[in-house]
Each structure stands twice: as C-alpha cells, then as structure tokens.
Image (spheres, coloured by chain):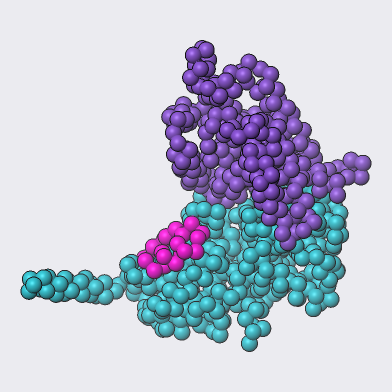
Chain colours: A purple, B cyan
Amino acid sequence: MLTILFDGIAYGMLLFILACGLTVTLGLMNFINLAHGAFAMAGGYVTVVMMNRYGISFYWCLPAAFIVSALIGLLLERTLYQWLYQAPHLDQVLFSIGIVFMAIAATDYFMGGQQQLINLPPELSGRMDVFGVGVGRYRLFTIIVCAALALALQLILSKTRFGSRLRAAVDDRRVAMGLGINVPLVFALTFAFGSGLAGLGGAMGAEILGLDPNFPLKFMIYFLIVVSVGGTSTVSGPFLAALLLGIADVAGKYYVPAIGPFVIYALMIVMLIVRPNGLFSRGGR
Amino acid sequence: MLNRRMLIAAAGVALSCLAAIPAAAQETIKIGLILPMTGPFASTGRQVSAGVKTFMAMKGDTVAGKKIELVIRDDAGTADQTRRIAQELVVNDGAKVLAGFGLTPLAMAVAPVATQAKIPSVVMAAGTASITKASEYITRTSGTLPQYSLPVGTWAAANKIRKVVTLVSDYGPGIDAEKWFTKEFKAKGGEIVEAVRVPLANPDFAPFLQRVRDAKPDAVFVFLPSGAGSLFMKQFADRGLADAGIKLIATGDVTDDDILNSMGKPAIGTITGHFYATAHDSPENKAYVAAFKKANSDMRPNFMSVGGYDGMALIYAALEKTKGDVTGPAFMAAVKGLSWTSPRGPVSIDPETRDIIQNIYMREVKDVNGELQNVEFQTFKDLKDPEKAEAK
C-alpha cells in the first residue's frame, strides 16, 4: 500500500519536472509550446550518449542535460520562437508540433529508432526497506531532486527580482518595457530555463519512462494534462496536479488493472469540470 | 466532335502500348517491401530490411534468370498507409510480390489487396497466429506467438515452477501469448495465480510489477514488444523481484538481441523461448551474422532480421521452383511445403496453413566474452503453429 503511494509520488514528481517547463512557457509567457517534450528528449539523449559512449558518471550527466537543453532552448527561442509570441495560438501550435516531428525524424536518423537504455550507478539501483516499506533507491533520489527543484522554482518566481520582472513582462509587455525591463532577455532566459528543466526531466526519466525518438509525442498528453489540471498561473498548482496524477495512475493500475489506463483521464475530466481554470487559479483570464 | 473522338482513341492506343512495355520487359521482378522505417516501430523495419539486404548481398540479385528489384516503402507503422502503399505498389509500380509487415494490423490491412490482386505476400515480422488465415496468398517466415509461447509453458511446468503470474501487452500478440502459455502450463499441472494485461503505451511498470510481487508466484511469464520489454527488465530487477525468488520467463521479444547487450546485468538469467538467437550455433548462422555485421556497421541481427532474410530465401526458392513464374496461384503452390536451412535451423512452410514450421529454442541470458547473449539450452523440434493445428 505505502509502496504504491511511494511509487506514485515518484512518478508524479517526474511528471512535474518534465511538465513544469511547460507551465512556465504556457502560463507565464502565454506561448503554447507543444515541442516541450523535444527538449526533454534532448536531455535524455545527452545522458545516453555521455554515459554509454564516453562512460561519464550519471551525476555529471544531469547538469549537462540541463545545460545542453537550455542552450538548445535559448538558440531556438532567439531564432524561431520569439517571432511567434504575438502570433495566434493556432500558429504557435502548428509551429511547435512541426518542431516535434522534425526532432523525432532527426533523432531517428542520428541515434536510431531503438529504445535507449542507461545503467545507473549501483548506489541508485535496487531497493531498500524503510520501516517495512519497499522503497526503490532511484525513485527516492528522483523524489528528493524533484522536490528540491520545485521549491527552488517557487522561490525564484515569487521572491526574486527576476521573478517579479518576469511576471510583470507577462502581465503587460508594453508597460514592462516602458519601465526599463529588458523583456526579450527575460523571455529568452525563462524559455531556456524551462527547456533546461525539461532536459533534466528527460535525463532522469530515461530510466523509468524509457527513451526513444517518439518520446515527445508519447508524453505530450501527460504534460498537457498536468498543466491543464494544475492551471498555468502558479508552480504549486501543476506540482500538486502532477503528484495527484502520478498517484492516481499508479494506484489505478495496481488496484483496478482492467481500467487502470483510464483513471487519469477520468480524473482530468472531473477536475476540469470542477475547476476549469486549474487547481489554484486567480480566476479566469 | 470527330477530333475529340480520335483523340480519345489515340490516347487509348498510346495507353495500351505503355501497358505492353512492361509485359515485354518481364526480366525483372519487383518485390515491394513495406516496413515501418520511421515511427515507434522503426527498429523492426531497420532489422528486417537489413536482413533482406544481407540475403541479397550473399546470394545475388538474380534467380531463375530473372533480376530481383527491391522497392522499400515506409508505412510508419500505421495500417491505412500500409494498405495504400500495397495498392500503389501493385497497381502503379507493378510489384509482383509483397513482403515485410512489421505488425499484425499492418499485415491484416494488406490481406484484401493480396487476395484481390492474387499477389503473394510474405509476412516477415508480425506474429499473431490468425494472419495467414486472412488471405490464401499470405505466407510467413517469422513465427507466431502461440508457437513460441507454448514451449515456454512446457518448460516451466517441467522445471518445478508451480505458480505463475502472466504479464502481457494488451493487444493481439500479447493475448495470443497469454492464452497459449496458460493453456499449456495448466494442462501440465501448473497454476496461473493472476493474469495482468499492460496497456501498449505504458510509461511506468511500477504498479504492475508491485502486483506481481504481492501475488508471490514462482515465476512471471512476460510478453512485451522489444523496446518496452527492456524497460520492464530493468524495473523488474530494481523492484527486487528476482531477490524475492520470482523467476522471469518470457518470449524472446523481451530479450531482443538488438538491445540485449545494453540491458546490462539485470537481464542475466532470464529464460526465454524463441526461434532465433544471434548466438545460435550453426555454420549457416555464423556466415549470416558475419555478413550482417559487415553490412550494417556491427549491428547485431535479431529475430526480425532473420525473418527478413528467410522471407527472401523463401521467395528465391519458390521462384526457382516455378522457373520464374510469379503469378499468384503458381507461386503459392510452390511455397507450400518448401523447406530450407535457415540461420535459425531447419524450417519449412506448412502446406496446409502456409505458416512456418520451425524449432523453438529455450535460452538463458548469459555473459559470453563480455557480451550478453541468449544461450540456447533446449530445443523443441519442428513446431507448427498450435492455434491453426487445433482449429482443424
């Protein structure tokens, strides 16, 4: 029972890290970026290449995955994304889904279509007993890292000057610029940070979720569920939503395997009926 | 008015001339190879096409005085595309034989085309038993799920395994595997504690594995498509199921040779039943593996590649027998009862069902000179597909 809860939390945390970058771009920058999973995939493949080809330690791969994905994010933001901030949402969707397909084809071409596997360091594999509850070491590691990140993210957005600039830039771009805030720079950094988080999520998820060129499409639905259930105006909303979905998914599959896969969708529908603007919304826009 | 009529007549004459040209130049035989070369099942397409090309590199591209021309088309793993491509290949490109078909629905989609156009179709990968029943122009060189799930049941019952949980992907092949393993295992006195079906697109196995663990069986029998299988393997080890005394027995899809080596330690000791292992010990296989690795930058051939290789072997052998006649009925008559020595061992085509008859090997994953291999330790000789055998 507690093991199931624990697995659910770990899964939810992972979903959160993967999706929180999307919360940032969608909620704060008001840009629908379906290509978010492509950045996660980039992070995953960075890890695979570093570990399997060059034998670099898993712990170094995590920051590397973050940095590489963030750099790719920065590059694409400067060259492509920034022209679409003012475009209608449909254009943004078409553009970013195009990026997804290009990313899939490119990855397939360079890395092959097979499932990529990594071998974790021994201290992270296996499981241990904590007060009689079987706990997977890697899942515990995931929970700790993700919880720390969630906390840091919340603090950055609500307490730092950068956070308030970002929120100002989002709420009213023209006034923010008039006040001397370098809006394009703020957006570029935010986008890069969101992409970097996705990359980190991809790297951490490679062990649990698997990694192949179709990763961005496979998980797009999960990201969108997390963001739509959680609402896009806060970080804590998606965080709780991700946990809820993770636990519901794992518990649903454990207790009622026959309808397990539907549990999260049912939950999503109920949530959207009850709270159409997300768990913690500031009211409709 | 007269002018227009003459124009139409002229066009008609021109068209019939065009149509006559390929008939006159019947020296080449086109084989339409339809495979998922992109999308989630791209690794299937990659392996099968590599197997096909290895065959042509080893045996040349002429048979019975005809030149064989391959046309490889990508269906991205979606059935409507497979069907459209099959029609195009037959109608526009003049393909005389169709082959490939990575997944059951893809093969099923082609069956009506094969029947209507009387085009022999060679299934090189898809594994649901019922495919060859869909059209009398379909034959198969891979294997069927019942064919290699049943021996795993026989083996388990004979090796002190009493209680088993089955865990399969929830689609055609998975259900085939579950059914035939269960049937054989129960008939030999075993007990199925629980049958778990996992959605095909499933990111995390944690809840299912926990269920298996809590049921405390002697072993868990698994069928999953190869990519998902390797993920499963890792989570199986991580959850400590092996330490809890639960054995992992599976069909060979789970320990796919293509990625077996990157699964690492957790895979060692897994018992699987299947029709081909890269490590199979025979001169034919040694030659095949060497040629395959040379042509494909050291990639390991897996069971899908050998399905492709034998598909070509079947087409060549049938053409030898018909002296180059590729018309549907003559070709299919030649196919029935053909037998040859494949890299996987002796195989033949069942004259009644057009399905393959072959040996199924029980294998254990072992570390052989620093590489993980499926090492064969027991052989079930000349097995037919049990599903169609029973239907009679």
Residue that sits furthest to the left in the current view = B2
Residue that sits furthest to the right in the current view = A131
Horizontal and vertical percent for residue B256? 63, 58
Residue B28, magenta (yes or no) = no
Residue B81, magenta (yes or no) = yes
Identify which residue is drawn at 11% across, 74% down.
B5
B7 or B167, which is in the foreground?
B7
Q: Report the number of numbered marks.
A: 0
Q: Is residue A276 left or right of residue B35?
A: right
Question: What span is in magenta?
Answer: B69-88
Identify which residue is drawn at 45% across, 36% down.
A88
A250 or A266, which is in the foreground?
A266
Identify which residue is drawn at 72% across, 59% down.
A259
Task: Examine the image and state in which quarter residue A120 appears.
Answer: top right
Horizontal and vertical percent for residue B71? 39, 62
Horizontal and vertical percent for residue A136? 80, 43
Q: Is residue A244 left or right of residue B123?
A: right
Q: Quadrant of the C terminus of chain B?
A: bottom right
Residue that sits furthest to the top in the current view = A180
From the viewer's perspective, is residue B284 above or below residue B347?
A: above
Q: Is residue B209 left or right of residue A42?
A: right
Horizontal and vertical percent for residue A94? 45, 42
From the viewer's perspective, is residue B172 above or below residue A200?
A: below
Q: Is residue B317 visible?
A: no
From the viewer's perspective, is residue B348 above or below residue A12?
A: below
Q: Is residue B178 visible?
A: yes
B336 or A202, which is in the foreground?
A202
Identify which residue is drawn at 8% across, 72% down.
B1
Residue that sits furthest to the bottom in the current view = B392
Q: Is residue B94 left or right of residue B149?
A: left
